[in-house]
């Protein structure tokens, strides 16, 4: 276990140290993070990084293979463009958590704010609390699991993506509809719940997905100004 | 960009430390706003018959005795406290008489704030320099809001800096941009609200001034603002006894709040809050979109 103190070193030095790792299996304990941005970004080795305290924007961005655990809250865009590996936030996440993630698993023990999983491209996100408005906006692939409630316009402009919600959904966005879970869907959900150590029967979740209505351009969706009608 | 910060003390024992606690909050937001900075501090409230005016000159060595003399003609018990290129004037006089005499005899001076407790100090430049220029660290007070500006839609000037005064003991800081400010400015001008700049935030300030003149309580004025202001914004509004926070319904401009038994704080980013005492165990949350938050006593119109 290597300790790294952000009071003594810059974020750039931290990230360089994480990139310079020669082999898998190392562990880092990062102290005094104090809400700084871009912490633990671009990891490519299978290492364990613990951040002690609240992190700022774009924490664990472009993450691959390793595990980053934030013992606190995170700012905007945690695990943005994650490729693989795991990012675990013990507190709450701000907006756009897991944005554009291609793979890997983001676990948020608390709530995630608006636009969680925006443009999700194949990653998995498990939120033990609730998510804010427009979550999974324009998501293309992957899975979002919400153990609490979802805010307005869930899955707006959805291409594809499995969305599971245990609680209430305030409203569904354009192109998003209620689905009946298949055995394959339930198996994916069950696997994610197990990984996030959540003991809830998968059958209790409601599933949402794309109604495919936005796959093709429809002239009826074009809104023309009043004067030109 | 732009950074907004606010600190409201629930524990009066901390009042001597307000400036010391707040200065690092403002400086931490330099990355979000290196063009100008400012703050509105609420301290040393004057009695009901005394008005407190913060004046700012373009000259650093302004002779304030002439101002004292002019104001002597319209009021009593004048106390002038210079601070760098600004001065706080306390005087027993009517607001309009003060404004009239200053406009006539000292047109070079700008009225930054007017009220019983508020003092607004702001300037173009780096936050760290503005904090030093006005001696913020040594200031005591009950609450304070501040702003660091990255100018987008209008010039980098002192006039375009925040906070903007919105009436007696009221002011506004803003992160975001309003898309309907030109039209709204014209509407408000016809209702008698005056504007000094092309700045969009000044329009929001003028809008609140107008709603309060129409008889809205602060909370009602902010509910109306949600309907009439179009754009992206997180707003912090300083009031005589506290502050208010409002985010637009989309809420893409950041805000994080912290509350302990001793204080309530808001900042654009957690970095501004990280040094506050007891932050490790504070309740932290992001204010919800389109919801009006008010701390301290509500201010009637």
Image: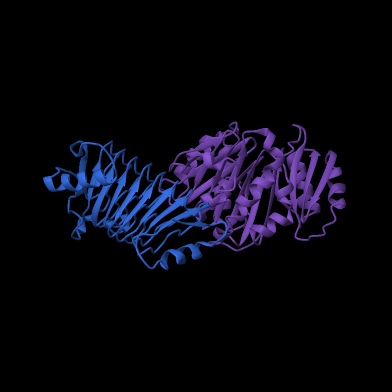
Q: Along the horizontal axis of the image, is A52 left or right of B144?
A: left
Query: In this rendering, does residue A173 appear at all?
Result: no
Depth check, front residue: B287 or B212: B287
Could you say which chain is coloured purple in the image?
Answer: B
Considering every residue shown, the one lying at the far front of the view is A1
Q: Quadrant of residue B33?
A: bottom right
Q: Is residue A43 visible?
A: yes
Q: Position of residue A48 (x, y in %)?
A: 38, 56
Asked if A59 appears above or below B72 in the picture, the reply is below
Which residue: 36% across, 58% down? A80
B229 left or right of A107 in image: right
Residue A50: give x, y in percent of width and height.
Answer: 43, 52
Is A114 left, or right, of A37 in this rendering? left
Residue A168: x, y in percent?
28, 36
Is A159 above or below relative to B275?
Answer: below
Foreground of the two, A85 or B184? A85
Color used for chain A?
blue
| x then y, percent, for residue A67 | 35, 55
């Amino acid at each position: 276990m290597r300790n790294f103190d952000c009071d003594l070193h810059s974020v750039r030095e931290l990230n360089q140290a994480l990139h310079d790792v020669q082999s898998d299996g190392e562990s880092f304990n990062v102290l005094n993070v104090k809400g700084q941005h871009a912490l633990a970004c671009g990891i490519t080795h299978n290492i364990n990084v613990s951040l002690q305290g609240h992190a700022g924007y774009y924490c664990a961005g472009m993450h691959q293979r390793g595990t980053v655990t934030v013992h606190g809250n995170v700012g905007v865009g945690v695990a943005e463009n994650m490729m693989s590996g795991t990012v675990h936030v013990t507190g709450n996440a701000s907006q756009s958590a897991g944005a554009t993630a291609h793979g890997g698993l983001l676990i948020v023990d608390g709530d995630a704010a608006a636009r969680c999983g925006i443009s999700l491209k194949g990653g998995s996100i498990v939120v033990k609390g609730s998510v804010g408005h427009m979550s999974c906006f324009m998501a293309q692939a992957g899975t979002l699991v919400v153990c609490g409630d979802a805010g307005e316009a869930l899955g707006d402009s959805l291409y594809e993506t499995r969305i599971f919600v245990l609680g209430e959904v305030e409203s569904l966005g354009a192109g998003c509809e209620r689905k009946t879970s298949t055995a394959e869907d339930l198996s994916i959900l069950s696997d994610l719940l197990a990984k996030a150590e959540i003991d809830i029967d998968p059958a209790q979740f409601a599933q949402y997905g794309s109604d495919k209505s936005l796959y093709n351009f429809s002239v009826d969706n074009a809104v023309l100004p009043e004067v030109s009608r | 960009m732009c950074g907004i910060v606010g600190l409201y003390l629930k524990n009066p024992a901390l009042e001597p430390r307000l400036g010391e606690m707040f200065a690092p909050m403002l400086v931490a937001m330099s990355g979000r706003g290196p063009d100008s900075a400012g703050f509105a501090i609420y301290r040393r409230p004057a009695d009901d018959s005394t008005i407190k005016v913060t004046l700012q000159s373009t000259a650093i060595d302004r002779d304030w005795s002439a101002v004292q003399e002019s104001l002597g003609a319209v009021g009593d018990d004048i106390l002038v406290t210079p601070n760098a290129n600004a001065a706080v004037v306390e005087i027993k006089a009517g607001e309009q008489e003060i404004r009239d005499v200053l406009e006539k005899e000292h047109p070079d001076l700008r009225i930054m704030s007017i009220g019983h407790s508020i003092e607004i100090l702001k300037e173009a430049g780096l936050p760290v320099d503005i904090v030093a220029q006005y001696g913020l660290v040594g200031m005591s007070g009950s609450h304070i809001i501040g702003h660091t500006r990255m100018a987008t839609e209008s010039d980098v000037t002192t006039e375009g800096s925040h906070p903007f005064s919105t009436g007696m003991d009221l002011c506004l800081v803003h992160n975001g941009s309003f898309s309907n400010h030109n039209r709204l400015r014209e509407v408000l001008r016809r209702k008698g609200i005056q504007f000094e700049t092309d700045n969009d935030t000044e329009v929001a300030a003028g809008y609140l001034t107008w709603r309060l003149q129409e008889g809205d309580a602060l909370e009602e004025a902010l509910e109306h603002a949600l309907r009439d202001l179009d754009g992206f914004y997180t707003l912090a509004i300083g009031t005589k006894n506290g502050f208010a926070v409002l985010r637009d319904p989309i809420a893409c401009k950041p805000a994080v709040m912290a509350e302990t038994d001793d204080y309530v704080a808001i900042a654009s980013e957690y970095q501004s809050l990280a040094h506050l005492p007891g932050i490790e165990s504070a309740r932290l949350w992001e204010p919800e979109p389109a919801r009006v938050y008010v701390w301290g006593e509500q201010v009637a119109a």
